Image (spheres, rainbow, N blue to C red):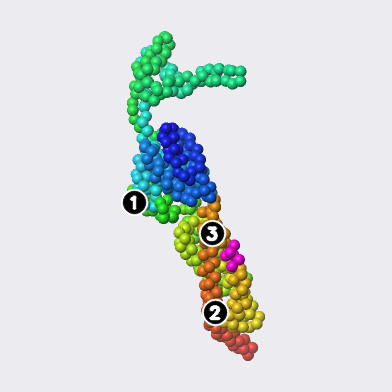
Amino acid sequence: MVERVHELAKVVMADPDVQTIYYWVGANPTVNSARLMIDLKPLSQRKASATDVVNRLRKATTRVPAIAFFAQARQDVQIGARVSKTQYQHTLQDPDVAELFKWAPIVLAKLSSLPELQDVTGDLQATAPRMMLKIDRNITGRLGISPQAIGDTLYDAFGQRQVATIFGELDQHRVILEATPASQEDASSLETLYVPSPAGQMVPLSVLTKSEMSVSPLTINHQDMFSSATLSFNLAPGHSLGEAIAAIQNAEQTLAKPASLTALYQGSAKVFETSLASQPYLIAAAIIAVYIVLGILYESFIHPITILSTLPSAGVGAFLALIALGYDFSLIALIGVILLVGIVKKNAIMMIDFALVGERHRHLTPEQSIYEACLMRFRPIMMTTMAALLGSLPLALGSGAGSELRRPLGIAIVGGLLLSRFLTLFTTPVIYIYLSKLTRRARRDQQPRINSKAAGQGDVATIRAAE
């Protein structure tokens, strides 16, 4: 494994955008795996992004035989502490270990066939060769050799037992008892081991034990007290995490999995799935809260709807900008859309607030009040919108380390402001006038019922007075 990692490191260092590489063997936690940490050159010295370099290394390392290379770009915001070969984790849990070992390769093969995923791998290594030594109790009992003596002999040969310490003037050296490295690589070396008996005889280990070859897992991972296997994957180019999760769910539905086998996402995929489930409720709660506050402010049930009508144009503008520039709707882009709710809404607030003052205090018609509001508030709306738009341009156009994370935020804000600025100046007055007409019509329909009710009460009062 060390030799192959050395070959792999040479291939990685041959890439023109790689600056340094650190690697170690046996850290994951078995000795047949290794971990590499690659530092790229500064952006000023390279043209390719981290994702482009990873794709390049994925192709270049295929020429190293008998080893698989998995890579992921390190994220500025890392969710979850679980380390896996690729970026997203999908964990299978089952109280029955045998059932888990049976179904984990089936699910892994199904996920590997999905076009939305790439670099699909797992941490379940259930086919490692294993040798079991079974002690012959009859022979050991007749010779008086205990199982402890057999275990001590095996540990002396393969366990690196410390037998002494040599002290120098400035340092000390530990003396380790073990078999030669060549003997440790071949199972036939067990035939050369001897176990001392109480009578002082050296008995061959092959006489006392019988060996059986089989396969077993190198490690058995556990999560929430159940045996588990983690399948990790990267996203294929042109596909988002939402598409990948939907594809995984559809693929698992086609498999007749047992009820005891459960599947859970971990890390970033788990947070995305959780936020995807609660996101509609959070957005609805935010809109209801805004509606209540605006209703209390304007003492109306209708005019908050006029203000909230500006939000769809901002969301559409943000989506169109992200699609046009080839960005996914990530968590950072969602934050930009949430910021747009507050920025875009103030355009309608400035117009509606001025129009309501004209209606209630100067007794203007809705058409006159909103027309005057558009004229008087046009300049403040343009100034505040341009200030927010120009303030977001550095995020949208910025470059340098970490710009990939910040750029969707700026693009969402700029795209939403551009579209909403033009649409809200035309749509808000129209919606205000129509909702005002609807309010007046509702009042006219309600007025005859109130008058008839008052007249009926007056007739009853007159009859009682006559009596």
Q: Would you call the spot at circle 2 few (<14 residues within 10 Å), some (14-19), or many (20 or more)?
A: some
The secondary structure that most of the magenta stretch takes on is helix
Residue 110, given in percent of the width and then of the height, sits at 35, 47
In x, y percent, where is residue 326?
Answer: 45, 59
Residue 331: image location, x then y, percent: 51, 56
Q: Earlier in the sequence, mark 2 or mark 3?
A: 3
Q: Nearer the viewer, residue 138 or 88?
A: 88
- Whether residue 99 is visible to the viewer of this picture, yes or no, is no
Disc 3 to disc 1, C-alpha distance: 44 Å
Q: Nearer the viewer, mark 1 or mark 2?
A: 2
Between disc 1 and disc 2, whose residue precedes?
1
Q: Which residue is drawn at 42% across and 43% down?
A: 70
Q: What stretch is highlighted in magenta?
A: 386-391
Amino acid at the residue labelled 3: Leu
Position of the C terminus by quadrant:
bottom right
Whether residues under marks 2 and 3 lie with C-beta atoms below 8 angstroms apart, the answer is no
Viewer-nearest residue: 379 or 366? 379
Q: Is residue 413 left or right of residue 92?
A: right
- From the image, tell me which residue sits under label 1: 254
* Label 2 – label 3 distance at C-alpha: 39 Å
Lower position in the chain sequence, tag 3 or tag 1: 1
Q: How many marks?
A: 3
In the picture as drawn, the residue positioned furthest to the right comes out as 361
Q: In this view, does 389 lie above or below 15?
A: below
Residue at the image position 48 percent from the left and 66 percent from the top: 316
Query: Tag 1's secondary structure?
Result: loop
Give the residue number, with chain letter if any, for mark 2.
433
* Residue type beneath disc 1: Thr
Q: Mark 3 points at which residue?
A: 397
Rendered position, 340 above or below 29: below
- Looking at the image, residue 391 sits to the left or right of residue 209; the answer is right
Front-most of residues 31 and 349: 31
